[in-house]
Amino acid sequence: MKLLPHEHARLIQQAIRAAQAAGALPAFPVPAVDIQPSKRADQGDYAATIALQLAKLAGQKPRAIAEAIVQHLPAADFVAGVEIAGPGFINFTLSRAYLLQQIEAIIAEDDTLFTLDLGQGRRAQVEFVSANPTGPITIGRSRGGIAGDTMARLLSAAGYSVEREYYFNNAGNQMVMLGNSLKVRYLQALGRPVTVPDKDDATFYQGEYLIDFARQLAHERGEALVDADWKPFKEYVEVKMFEWIKESLARIGIVHDVFFNEDSLYQEGSLWAVLAALKEKGYIYSAAEWEGATEAEKAKAAGKQPAQWFRTTAFGDDKDRVLVKSDGTPTYTLPDIAYHKNKIERGFDLMINVLGADHGTQYKIVQYGISALGMDPAKIHVILNQMVSFVRDGRPFKGSTRRGVFDTLDELVDEVGADAIRYHLLARSPGTHLEFDMDAVVKQSNDNPVYYIQNAYVRCCGIFREAEARGLTDDGADLSLLSDTEIAFIRKVLEMGEVIETAVTHFEPHRIAFYAQELAGVFHPIYDQVRVLHTEVPADVAKARLRFYRAARVAFRRVLLLMGMSTPERM
RNA sequence: GCCCCUGUAGCUCAGCGGAUAGAGCGUUGCCCUCCGGAGGCAGAGGCACAGGUUCGAUUCCUGUCAGGGGCACCA
């Protein structure tokens, strides 16, 4: 289907060229034309402000420019009228015939409604969730998961070939700690004398899930691992966690195509190659403390073995960063740079990273690393989600995986269901802090936008169930019998393409959630008013209306699928 | 102290430099014998503050104030 703002913009650009050729406008390069949907009915359907913007460039009054443009405007089937308003707005009104035709077009496109050619089949990659396998998926992590997955769905709709990737951090010190923690629980499960570290021990994972895993492990392997080091425990817990995380994500409709193991960067040695490359370019030095260290930092570093520092201050950072610790093991940053280098080398046309705000600084350092390697970090777009705070029983609380205090996605799915989670975590712009009130989501579920939107779909389905039972069909419907009320809804449906475009180009997946609610808001009053099966509705009108509701059903199904929500046919 | 994000209705939030700033919840009043009422209609109620850029600023820039997050040889 056409993206109407683009179509209108094209008309205006043609008109400007024609007006220039005719001498009605002076010569100047034809600029990009911004078209926006009108906010009020008396301002048409779409508005252009180009005449106001051109005033200086053309050296004419905005209204005169608008008149010159309108006079040279080519005809188009979708335009019924053009008006100049106020200081120089050009307002377009869509033709009724065109809007009625769109009903058939919507029905024909069905689940591919508004599949755009913006991506033209180019390869896009979205990396999201990428939570550490040290505990179950938390609700805080889920925000990025939903943003990423919805972004992927929108990119598909926009015509990209999309890959969803999860960077699996199964390496590093945390995994050693996790393995050691499991060993303690394992020994405990076998009844061996062992002291369990207390809550203040930063090297011990308190989570109860480790007790369960340990019992299973003890059952499977008996005493065989009593004298083993952390490795078999790490391997065991990693596999278990991986399965658990995948299952949890699948419950809210998130399935990744690629799981990239951090471990593989160690196995292939690619992180050391990155270090060598950075060293060759002069960004690495060996020292106990960084070059600009304060007296306090120097005192802290006294007696330490040298570490490998990355001179990020060359890129504007506050201080240099350690890539290899004095014990010879890398920090998280080195494999992270290697991972992003690998990603760029895989040749995607578009890459999106969905991160939590707490990773903002870390990502900045990765960008420095990519720049230092001579690559362009701007190729990777970042959606930086602000933190989610949780309120339960009217009080805020914070989770911590290590202390074993968390709220898991699983628990939340059990409580409120996948659809409510998807909608509520999606319906907020990424830059705003999200307050998730568990009680409110449960309590208010009857007034939830989730059900408001789904009910629109349910109502459409209901009509068709009943129509079928009465032997009514919409075959050969005469759409000209529809009123402006129904046409207003079709106009709203046509905005879906524009919303998909904006969401994709601005990396703002939340836009589809607000659009869905607006669409339902236009629908429900119409449903109330436009009856199909009522006895007083003439048969031919009923047929036309049934056709209309078929298009509405397609639209709601499409928008629900784009948000990764279910499409229940009855409530 | 430095960096990032955010201040829009009582609450939770939309708002792509344009013409009278929108929803939902809550609240006040009303409607519905009718395809499932998880509905509809109407009312009250708002851009933190001060400068700047612009024909035009809720939107961009600077500052102030307020809130959140980040500032490890953790990941």
Image (tube, coloured by chain):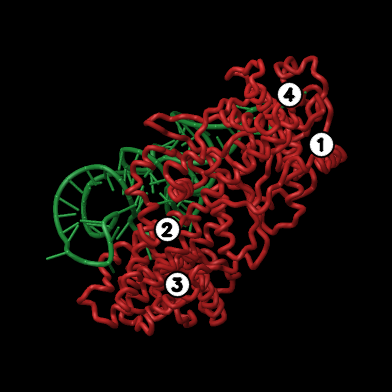
Chain colours: A red, B green
Eyeballing the image, is A251 above or below A199?
A: below
Q: Secondary structure at mark 1?
A: loop
Residue A66, numbered label: 3
Please, is residue A93 above or below residue A366 in the view?
below
| Dots 2 and 3 on the same chain | yes
Q: Is residue A375 above or below residue A281?
A: below
Chain under disc 4: A
Dot 4: element? loop
Looking at the rendered image, the disc whose residue lies closer to the viewer, 1 or 4, is 4
Chain for numbered disc 2: A
Give residue A396's quadrant in the image: top left
Q: Mark 1 Cα within 10 Å, few/some/many (few <14, many 20+)?
A: many
Q: Assign the C terminus of chain A to one quadrant of the image.
A: bottom left
Per the image, the residue denoted by label 4 is A226
Q: In x, y percent, where is residue A557?
A: 45, 63
CA gap, disc 2 to disc 3?
A: 34 Å
Q: Is residue A349 left or right of residue B63?
A: right
Tag 3's secondary structure? helix
Q: Can the viewer see residue A129?
A: yes
Q: Amino acid at mark 1?
A: Tyr
Query: Within 10 Å of the Cα at label 4, are there few (<14), some (14-19), or many (20+) other Cα atoms?
Result: some
User: Quick one: label 2 or label 4, which is nearer the N terminus?
Assistant: 4
Q: Position of residue A6 (x, y in %)?
A: 52, 70
Q: Are marks 2 and 3 in contact (CB under 8 Å)?
A: no
Q: Which percent across, then down, holds residue B48?
A: 38, 38
Q: Check residue A283 in the rendering and tell me which mark sits there, or answer none.
A: 1
**Dot 2: element:** helix
Disc 1/disc 4 C-alpha distance (Å): 45 Å
